[in-house]
Image (cartoon, grey):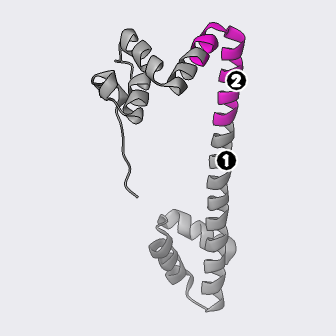
């Protein structure tokens, strides 16, 4: 899937009458758009006018602002917890996989040293890690 990135600080609008809807929104979000041009864009696009009004009310209301920031922090914390849980699950899955591999090598009556070598090569573990794993699960 192709991705398109728009660097808003670099966005340079043209005459508002010549802009399409996407360009007007880009100009609205761009920090380099002058206030006079924003007013003209808002006058030509009802949704942008509404967004500017909500933004104005929001930035002047400290309680709403704090509430929003708390909600955003909560969402970021939740996302971080989910990433952490996924990583821990992946690690637990790898640990289970390693234990199963050692059990299989043992069942095949492979020499312990050869088993350690196989674990090192297959799972990219250090000799110390592979030795500890094999010895604790042999």
Q: Is residue 22 left or right of residue 68?
A: left
Whole-percent x, y for residue 9 in the image: 34, 24
Q: Is residue 25 or residue 126 the one in the foreground?
A: 25
Q: Residue at x 66, y 28 (%)?
A: 73
Which one is nearer the viewer's eye here, 117 or 91?
Answer: 91
x and y percentages locating residue 4 in the rendered image = 36, 45
Rendered position, 138 above or below 1 = below
Q: CA distance from mark 2 to mark 1?
A: 18 Å
Could you classify mark 1 by the number of other residues whose Cα lies within 10 Å: few (under 14), some (14-19), or many (20 or more)? few
Percent across and percent down for residue 66 are: 68, 16
Residue in the image at 38% along x and 9% along y: 36
Disc 2 to disc 1: CB gap under 8 Å: no
Q: Is residue 61 above or below residue 104?
A: above
- The image quadrant where one finds the N terminus is bottom left
Badge 2, how many Cα within 10 Å: few under 14, some, many 20+?
A: few
Q: Which residues are magenta?
A: 54-76
Q: Which mark is residue 105?
A: none
Where residue 98 sits, quadrant-wise, is bottom right
Residue wearing tag 1: 82
Give the dominant element type of the magenta stretch: helix, strand or loop: helix
Give the residue number, with chain letter if any, for mark 2: 70
- Against 30, residue 129 (above or below) is below
């Amino acid at each position: 899937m192709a991705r398109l990135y728009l660097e808003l600080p670099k966005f340079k609008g043209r005459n508002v009458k010549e802009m399409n809807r996407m360009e007007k929104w880009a100009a609205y979000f761009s920090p380099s758009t002058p206030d006079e041009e924003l007013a003209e864009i808002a006058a030509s696009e009802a949704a942008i006018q509404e967004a500017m009004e909500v933004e104005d009310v929001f930035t002047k209301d400290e309680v709403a602002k704090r509430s929003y920031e708390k909600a955003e922090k909560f969402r970021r914390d939740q996302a971080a917890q989910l990433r952490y849980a996924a990583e821990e699950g992946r690690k637990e899955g790898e640990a289970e996989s390693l234990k199963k591999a050692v059990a299989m090598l043992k069942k095949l009556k492979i020499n312990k040293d050869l088993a350690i070598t196989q674990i090192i090569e297959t799972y990219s573990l250090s000799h110390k890690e592979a030795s500890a794993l094999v010895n604790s699960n042999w």
